[in-house]
Amino acid sequence: MNRTTLFLILASCCLSLVLAGCTESNPVKPINGTEVITTIQLALTKNGADTSYVVWEDVDGAGGRAPNRIDTIKLDASTMYNGTLKLLNASAIPTADVTPDIRSEMNQHQFIGYDEKGLVVWAANDVDGLGKPIGLSFTMYTSSTKGQGSLTLTLYHYDAEADKEAGKPGVESDISVVFPVVVQ
């Protein structure tokens, strides 16, 4: 066997191995089916008229660089705010609105907001098909105490509808973010 023939046989074998490893029979799937969310936009309305917007954004996603934008939520003391959340995947081209995906899977999702200092009380306004909270629409009540704190918003993902309970964190989360809060 000459060298050219041997080379062609080896090249054919290598090419066959590479092509065999590139089949679609085992496509890569997300481990827990979580959504890719890089940006959260909050619209906060006070007294039915004054609307302010705050953004948390981490374009390269979890585990990469630190978030590139975290706005401070500035609120008046002893005030009620109605709010809505918009979720985006800015790593997609063009940027994808993930909010409809969460709404379509509302029985498996719940936002829970928490402020450990008690400056803000967060409550979901919208409910899923089973009457359990979702949290894409919410109300925030501020205390009469002025100060600085933080609001943690976590979107929990439940594999089974039966696992979802109002205000009870799930085992898995799609995203958890912390907004600085100032009550003035």
Image (cartoon, rainbow, N blue to C red):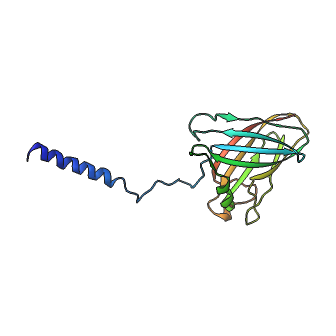
Q: Residue at x 88, y 48 (%)?
A: 48
> Residue 26 is drawn in which quadrant?
bottom left
Quadrant where the C terminus is found in the figure: top right
The image position of residue 146, as x and y in percent, is 88, 34
Q: Residue at x 41, y 58 (%)?
A: 24
Task: Tell whether 26 sits left or right of 17.
Answer: right
Mark count? 0
Is residue 130 or residue 83 the one in the foreground?
83
Task: Tell whether 173 sits left or right of 150.
Answer: left
Q: Residue at x 64, y 35 (%)?
A: 67
The image position of residue 80, as x and y in percent, is 88, 46
Task: Tell whether 10 sits left or right of 67.
Answer: left
Work out which residue is located at the far front of the displayed protein and give it. 94
Work out which residue is located at the far left of the displayed protein and give it. 1
Task: Tell whether 64 sits left or right of 53.
Answer: left
Is residue 17 or residue 152 the one in the foreground?
17
The image position of residue 133, as x and y in percent, is 76, 58
Is residue 116 or residue 69 the one in the foreground?
69
Q: Residue at x 73, y 55 (%)?
A: 168
Above-or-below relation of 181 to 47: above
